[in-house]
């Protein structure tokens, strides 16, 4: 085969076949128009492989130099948009190899020594995903910081805490936001864990059985940064598993799905809080839209879309699991279908994290140089809502328990008090002392401190509680953790 034979007229494997591939099959089986985003990983993996081949004496120094120069030109062509991606060459790997062979001749043909597209693509996807996980980890850090800073400004704002979407107990709005910081912190831990298992080298496994060439796989792993915390190379240990494993992609998509679920839960609350029935917050206009028919409407499109996109990401997880469930060892063409759901999951999650960070934390106004908040809090509306559902009923029960009343008896006493307050259309704190004492003689005038929203908040001083002092301590902990 001449240097130019590996082009649009010939696949890398065509010598065995007596007729060309049909145009329909060509379009059906090609992946180049979506897997071309792997080009940087493909070139990095190829250069590391070539350097190792030269170090092992499998190719000459002149071949290595030619490959390096050719890859540098291909990089420039792709970055400038001059590179011609060809459908006939199926995928990113053959497109780059064909162009390299055009540029440097036989040296380009020698690059594929000791490897297959099976271990090549497994390496490329791992390298690419590792970089994306690093970006996502940074975005998660930014979102947590934004939530922490909004929480810090609203530690003393009282929000009705809900169970079953019924008013339960008063909580600090800052405390409520920190609950999401905890969720996203766990997401960051999961992505870090996925990254460790993603960062293992399949290259050198060849098609499925390994290779007869004396490859130094550990050298390639070190070159590509596929090492553990101690700097030890991390290698896939079984060639069959190495080329067919997509656990890392499924794990990533599972972690992404859970992260999107957390975003969806936050979205649901933002949507509820923004509605006129609640009026707890206002989302900046740049994150909302109007109605084509109702001029008074301001719709929370960003949270609504994020809630919807969560289903999209969870669907990709189900698709990847289903993709793998029936595959025998080793590599099968089915695995080409792993990339589009994985790519879309990454894109959706990154875009969502970026927009939520700005929507919650605000942005710098280039005209004034000042930060404009994305969310405005209506503290009066929140506090008034907390007064509507007898949110301090548990505090009255606790008050009686501290006076020596068994909790179950105290619980029943408070139920009668709430019933009376309901009939008088007032809060528990608005019942006269004489009325409260009618429910239990141990009730005294100090009960009103326990029945106040602020008193209820301040009383919950245990670690993880909603007392402002505890919330401030958690804010400081998160600031130190997030850097």
Image (cartoon, rainbow, N blue to C red):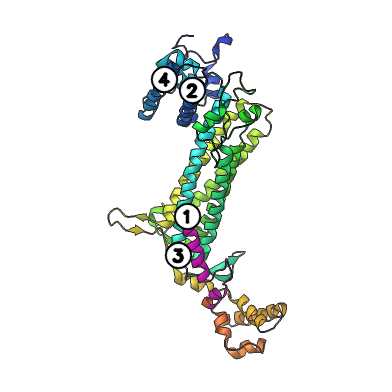
Residue found 60% across the figure and 39% down from its top:
250
Give the label, 2 or 3, closer to the camera.
2
| Residue 363 appears in the rendering | yes
Mark with earlier residue (4, 2): 2
Start-end of magenta stretch: 455-483
The residue pinned by badge 3 equals 152
x then y, percent, for residue 419:
64, 80
Q: Is residue 91 above or below residue 141?
A: above
Q: CA distance from mark 1 to mark 4?
A: 44 Å
Find disc 1 in the rendering and name its residue.
482
Q: Nearer the viewer, residue 95 or 317?
A: 95
Secondary structure type for disc 4: helix
Q: Earlier in the sequence, mark 1 or mark 3?
A: 3
Q: Quadrant of the C terminus?
A: bottom left
Dot placed on the residue nearer the N-terminal end, 1 or 4: 4
- Label 2 environment density (alpha carbons within 10 Å; few <14, some 14–19, many ≥20): many
Q: Nearer the viewer, residue 480 or 334?
A: 480
Mark 1: secondary structure: helix
Q: Is 310 located above or below residue 197 in the figure?
A: below
Label whose residue precedes the other's in the sequence (2 or 3): 2
238 falls in the magenta region? no
Where is residue 145? Give x, y as percent: 45, 56
Quarter assignment of residue 65: top left
Q: Main secondary structure of the magenta part?
A: helix
* Proximity of marks 4 and 3: CB atoms separated by less than 8 Å: no
Q: Which residue is mark 4?
A: 65
Of the two numbered discs 1 and 2 in the rendering, the one whose residue sits closer to the viewer: 2
**In the image, is residue 469 part of the stretch drawn in magenta?**
yes
């Amino acid at each position: 085969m001449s240097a130019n034979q590996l082009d649009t007229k010939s696949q890398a494997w065509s010598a065995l076949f007596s007729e060309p591939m049909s145009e329909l099959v060509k379009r059906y089986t090609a992946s180049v128009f979506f897997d071309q985003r792997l080009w940087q990983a493909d070139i990095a993996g190829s250069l590391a492989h070539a350097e190792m081949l030269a170090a092992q004496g499998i190719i000459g120094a002149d071949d290595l130099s030619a490959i390096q120069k050719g890859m540098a030109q291909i990089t420039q062509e792709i970055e400038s948009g001059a590179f011609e991606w060809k459908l006939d060459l199926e995928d990113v790997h053959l497109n780059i190899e064909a162009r390299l062979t055009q540029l440097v001749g036989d040296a380009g043909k020698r690059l594929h020594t000791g490897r297959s597209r099976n271990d090549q693509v497994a390496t490329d996807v791992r390298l690419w995903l590792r970089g994306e996980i690093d970006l996502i980890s940074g975005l998660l850090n930014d979102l947590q910081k934004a939530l922490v800073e909004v929480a810090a400004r609203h530690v003393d704002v009282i929000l009705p805490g809900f169970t079953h979407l019924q008013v339960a107990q008063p909580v600090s709005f800052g405390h409520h936001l920190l609950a999401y910081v905890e969720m996203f912190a766990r997401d960051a831990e999961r992505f870090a864990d996925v990254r460790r298992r993603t960062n293992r080298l399949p290259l050198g496994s060849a098609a499925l059985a390994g290779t007869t060439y004396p490859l130094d796989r550990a050298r390639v792993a070190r070159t590509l940064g596929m090492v553990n915390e101690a700097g030890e190379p991390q290698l896939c240990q079984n060639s069959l598993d190495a080329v067919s494993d997509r656990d890392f992609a499924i794990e990533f998509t599972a972690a992404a799905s859970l992260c999107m679920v957390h975003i969806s839960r936050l979205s649901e609350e933002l949507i509820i809080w923004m509605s006129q029935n609640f009026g707890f917050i206002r989302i900046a206009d740049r994150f909302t839209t109007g109605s084509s028919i109702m001029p008074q409407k301001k719709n929370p499109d960003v949270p609504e879309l994020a809630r919807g996109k969560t289903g999209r990401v969870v669907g990709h997880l189900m698709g990847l699991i289903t993709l793998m469930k029936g595959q025998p060892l080793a590599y099968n063409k089915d695995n080409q279908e792993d990339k589009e759901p994985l790519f879309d999951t990454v894109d959706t999650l990154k875009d969502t994290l970026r927009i939520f960070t700005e929507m919650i934390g605000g942005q710098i106004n280039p005209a004034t140089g000042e930060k404009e908040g994305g969310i405005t809090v209506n503290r009066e509306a929140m506090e008034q809502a907390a007064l509507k559902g007898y949110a301090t009923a548990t505090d009255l029960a606790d008050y009686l328990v501290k006076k020596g009343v068994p909790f179950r008896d105290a619980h029943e006493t408070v139920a009668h008090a709430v019933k009376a307050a309901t009939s008088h259309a007032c809060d528990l704190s608005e019942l006269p002392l004489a009325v409260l004492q009618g429910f239990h003689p141990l009730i005294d005038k100090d009960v009103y401190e326990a029945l106040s929203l602020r008193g209820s908040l301040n009383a919950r001083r245990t670690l993880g509680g909603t007392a402002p002092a505890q919330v401030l301590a958690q804010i400081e902990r998160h600031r130190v953790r997030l850097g």
